[in-house]
Image: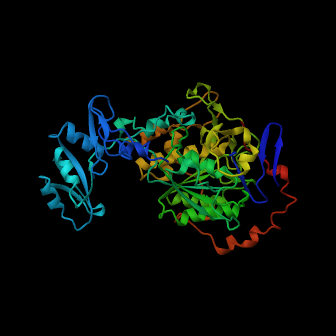
Amino acid sequence: MGYTRRTAFFHHTVTTGVLALLGTAALPAVADADQAAGQAAGQTAGQTAGQSAGTTIGTTGQPGGAGGKVPLDPSLRAHPYLQYGAHKESGRRVRVIVQKVSRGASSQAIAQAAGAAVLKEFPFINGLVMEVPQQAVLALARNPNVRYVSPDMPLQLHGISETKLKTTYERAISIPKIWNGELTNGSLRATGKGVGVVVIDTGIDRLHSDFYYSKVTAIKVNGLAKSDKDFHGHGTHVCGVINGYDSRGRYVGVAPDAHVISAKITSDGGVATEADLLEGLQWAFDNRLTYNIRAVNISMTGGVASDYRSSPTAAAVEQLWLNGVVVVAAAGNKGSDKGATWYAPANDPFIITVGALDHNQTIDGADDGLAFFSSRGATQHGYYKPEIVAPGRKIVAPLAGGNTTLSSQFKDRIVDKYWIRLSGTSMAAPVVTGVVALLLEQFPNLTPKQVKWLLVNTANAYPGQADSAGVVDPVDALLTAASGSVGMSNQGIQLNEGIDPATGTVLWSQAYWDQAYWDQAYWDQAYWDQAYWDVATAYD
């Protein structure tokens, strides 16, 4: 098994197992941490450090302006802006935060010495808040019991500027409106904060700059892997679509504040079997409460058609679903081939299966169309898949560092050195998973059935749409959820045969997991011809 090229397409062969990757593939709300820390009523970021004795600030109403100069004393334990104010508006009363040198120092005594009263105390930082005239700050800062005096500055909610984005897929489905609170006067602002999302894939490059500000946990599930690092590149890209955040704002995931848990189920070479996938799903199930796991992203599918009613993978995803975890799976890249949607877990009617929209790298939906490689059609039991589509062509997201499979195979698709442009339903699925995180941040009590209903029933039509799978519309989904008029999906669907319909629990016995079932002889090598496993992935 390996990598082959056929005409203009790249085909990824996974292994003699059953998984195929379906594509070649956060900063928090404050956009600039340095700016947030340094700004106070007009203070320019970075002015507080490195100022020597005699440094001056202009006095035209803003620090740094032209005009008269005010001396600043770097040895004085007071924020430069307060020193500026003490000289220019000495009588103006301001609220300040005072950090004490020790917990034993009396807050009341410090306040009384400054002619003020304690408004609040914060024992865990040995701090207090008081209101004083600005002229009193200079004496306050010289108090031997005071570590530092800083302004009780108003916090600024920094939106994620869409003007800096070099990508279009987020804007094509109006994600910035949600990031920046443009819905119902900001009450529906969401970035995925607090929502745990498991990405079952090839691992993650945690050292990539897009994850410096994102909340990421890496787990190694596959015992053959030496580390949780991504030597392939697929998992890093998928994770980045969900919560990556370039510090310059050029590349931003759909839910930059979500907590992504990368569950590496492949070997270091990107090889996995269905048993590995089941291990990843088991880990997500066992740890769902610890990490507040509300969604699982699976950007891979089985290489063998299977009946969802008897598939162990289907049983696993349904068990997660019944326990409050939304499962999102890529549809596959078999286009309209016969049986294109017959593969687990994408063929399970309970979960959300995602197809790829070609949005032509524009924000205008008039030129959108279904990506030609996106699997679609009826499953063995007549359920149409996918239920929804999302941008999945030419998606730019983090490139795992080192000599990875993707970086060596797709040098021509590397963007700005550290990102890569990939296509596939692998890229579309995490877009929807990110939207799920946005929904669940605002409405944590939504069940998987309700989340699926919201996404499907608020989806938009697109030019040339030939089936019921519309384009995900996160704005309408949030607004509909806020209205309280939410329905339930999956009515009348038969559960996997491993699920007890009376209790909604899995009836798996040890025999069901008998290792003999996974014996190499069972998967006769002659049966799994290489051509059978080739899955078109990296369309450009």
Name the quarter where the N terminus is drawn: bottom right
Name the quarter where the C terminus is drawn: top right
Residue 232, x across and y down, in percent: 70, 53
Left or right for 363, reference 399: left
Left or right for 338, reference 263: right
Residue extending farthest to the top is 366
Residue extending farthest to the front is 54
Left or right for 524, reference 119: right
Residue 460, x across and y down, in percent: 54, 33
Where 122 falls versus 234 (above or below)? below
Depth check, front residue: 444 or 43: 43
Residue 149, x across and y down, in percent: 26, 52
Depth check, front residue: 141 or 94: 141
Identify the residue at horizontal 52%, vertical 56% (top origin): 325
Whether residue 316 is visible, yes or no, is: yes
Colour option used: rainbow
Where 126 falls versus 183 (above or below)? below
Depth check, front residue: 330 or 459: 330
Residue extending farthest to the right is 526
Residue 344, x across and y down, in percent: 68, 54
Where 485 falls versus 233 (above or below)? above
Whether residue 433 is visible, yes or no, is: no
The image quadrant that residue 147 belongs to is bottom left
